[in-house]
Amino acid sequence: MKITILCSSEKHPVNNMLTEWIHRNNKNHDIQLARKKTELSGGDLLFLISCSEIISIPERNKFKKTLIVHASDLPQGRGWSPHVWEIINGAMGITVSLLEAEDNVDSGDIWKKLHITIPPHALHDEINDLLFTAEAELMDYAVDNFFTIHPQKQSAEIEATYYPRRTESDSELDPHNSISSQFGLIRVCDPARFPAFFMLHGHKYKLTLEKVKDE
């Protein structure tokens, strides 16, 4: 098959997984990694992985199928960074959905869902490892079942919910609250791109967190 993966940012941590996935599959398939929708030349399958652009019908029509990997139990959790919002709100696990792209955000038919447990001690990089492993498994599933899949429509009996795009301000901590009460937020903040921070005494402080092994 001719497969294109559209991932907008070269700095996104998912790129290591994508590089490994391409290396593992490029002997059997023609695979391209694109950064902008203007680079899409067409083919059988388009994966939208951490894609920040709107991919409309003209772009999708270049492919037989356009699929998204989205980290929520759809139709709940449509929108931006759902697993981050859910972990901040106390979730001990997340569902990762493989679905078809449509004009209405995250509304397409479901190909498969996977549930992963998030340990309460897991930090940003460990959460990503669990999430990206599930994403790679769903990408494998899409390729293996491309010609035989019977997608399921999202349940109309479950009310859809939506998360907003996260901004820098969403990583702000309250220095007067305890670490434990804000641990969910601290551990999901990307230390390179969106680090946790707090304001105190007229200054802004960045906070990073890492595990220390007992010697």
Image: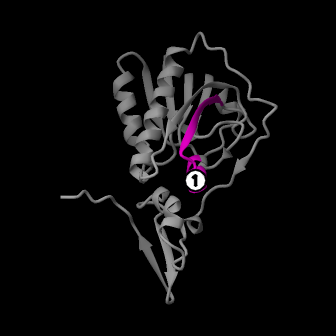
The color scheme shown is one colour
User: Against 93, is 157 above or below?
Assistant: above
Q: In front: 95, or 141?
A: 95
Place of residue 67 in the rendered image (x, y in percent of width and height, measured from the top left):
60, 29
Residue 44 falls in image quadrant: top right
Left or right: 103 as drawn, with respect to 33: right
Whether the magenta-drawn stretch holds residue 7 is answered as: no
- Which residue in the structure is indicated by mark 1? 90
Place of residue 57 in the rendered image (x, y in percent of width and height, measured from the top left):
71, 32
Place of residue 182 in the rendered image (x, y in percent of width and height, measured from the top left):
52, 66
Residue 63 visible in the shown view: no
Whether the magenta-drawn stretch holds residue 92 is answered as: yes
Density class for disc 1 (Cα within 10 Å; few <14, some 14-19, many ≥20) is few
> Looking at the picture, which amino acid does disc 1 mark?
Gly
User: Against 35, is 5 above or below?
Assistant: above
User: Against 183, is 103 above or below?
Assistant: above
The image shows a total of numbered marks equal to 1
Residue furthest to the top: 148
Instruction: Give, as a single range, the part of the protein colored magenta.
Output: 83-100
Q: Residue at x 60, y 58 (%)?
A: 166
Residue 50 falls in image quadrant: top right
Left or right: 205 as drawn, with respect to 185: left
SS assignment at label 1: loop
Q: Quadrant of the C terminus?
A: bottom left
Q: Residue at x 59, y 62 (%)?
A: 167
Place of residue 79 in the rendered image (x, y in percent of width and height, measured from the top left):
67, 46
Q: In front: 110, or 126?
A: 126
Residue furthest to the left: 215
Q: Residue at x 60, y 53 (%)?
A: 85
Residue 21 visible in the shown view: yes
